[in-house]
Each structure stands twice: as C-alpha cells, then as structure tokens.
Amino acid sequence: MPAMDDLRITAEVVIPAGELHWRFDPSGGPGGQHANKSSTRVELSLDVTTSTAFDDVLRKRILDQLEARLKDGVLTIQVGESRSQWRNRQISRQRMAAALREAMRPPQPKRRRTKPGR
C-alpha cells in the first residue's frame, strides 16, 4: 500500500515519496512583506534515470518523450502561482503526475491514408 506522500501516476505506477525532492524559495513579485518572508515558490524534482517506479521500457519512453524538459535525467516542476506553499505543492504534484502520465502513453500507430469510398 502506497504511503500518503507517494505520488500515484497510474494504478500500477507509484513514485515513492523518498524519490521526490522539494525545494522552497520566496516567490518574489507583489505581495509586500509576506512575499519577502515566505518561501512559497515550490520546485519538485524527480530523477527519472534512477527512479524505482519505472521499468526499463517505461523509463526509456519517458526519457525520449520528455527529452527537452529534462536536465541530466531530472524532471523539475516549478510553481509559484499561489501565496500558499501548501497549494503550490499540490499543483506541482498534479503537474508532475500529468507530465509523466502523458510521457508514459504508448505511441499511437501512424494513420495510413486510404482513398475515400463512393
């Protein structure tokens, strides 16, 4: 049974909480004293190359699909939309799961052109 902070991607794929790396910074921008003192901007990272959640086939598919977004095999999601760190954490988890779910989808076969019927 997955732990509470594990990130569920699909029914079969769950990323253990220990593989997710969090970083918090002040968000900057308007907000006065609150923005200057609170570390509300969230950065969530996952090293896809070493994650135990993926088998070799899924790992290769994810690395190929997310090649432009990865740096040294690490997928990083940054969120600073909300003034609440908790809300930004939730948004970053959702975006990480959505990006991985999209990258894990098997490639669709190419459509073969056919002539239209009568």
Image (spheres, rainbow, N blue to C red):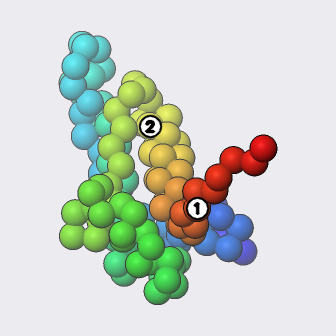
Place of residue 97 in the rendered image (x, y in percent of width and height, measured from the top left): 53, 55
User: In this rendering, does residue 86 appear at all?
Assistant: no
Place of residue 112 in the rendered image (x, y in percent of width and height, measured from the top left): 58, 61
Identity of the amino acid at label 1? Answer: Arg
Toward the bottom, the furthest residue is 56
Q: Residue 14, located in which quarter of the rendered image?
A: bottom right
Q: Mark 2 = which residue?
A: 88
Toward the front, the furthest residue is 118
At a point 36% along the width and 81% down the height, the residue shown is 50
Q: Is 42 placed above or below 30 here?
A: below
Q: Is 54 placed above or below 26 here?
A: below
Horizontally, residue 108 falls left or right of residue 116, namely: left
At a point 39% along the width and 28% down the height, the residue shown is 81
Horizontally, residue 27 falls left or right of residue 21, namely: left
Q: Mark 1 = which residue?
A: 112
Q: Foreground mark, 1 or 2? A: 1
> How many residues crowd around disc 2 within 10 Å: few (fewer than 14), some, or many (20 or more)?
many
Residue in the foreground of this view, choosing between 76 and 41 = 76
Q: Residue 22, located in which quarter of the rendered image?
A: bottom left
User: In this rendering, does residue 67 appear at all?
Assistant: yes
Residue 102 numbered mark, or none = none
Identity of the amino acid at label 2? Answer: Asn
At a point 43% along the width and 69% down the height, the residue shown is 62
Q: CA distance from mark 1 to mark 2?
A: 44 Å
Place of residue 104 in the rendered image (x, y in percent of width and height, measured from the top left): 53, 66
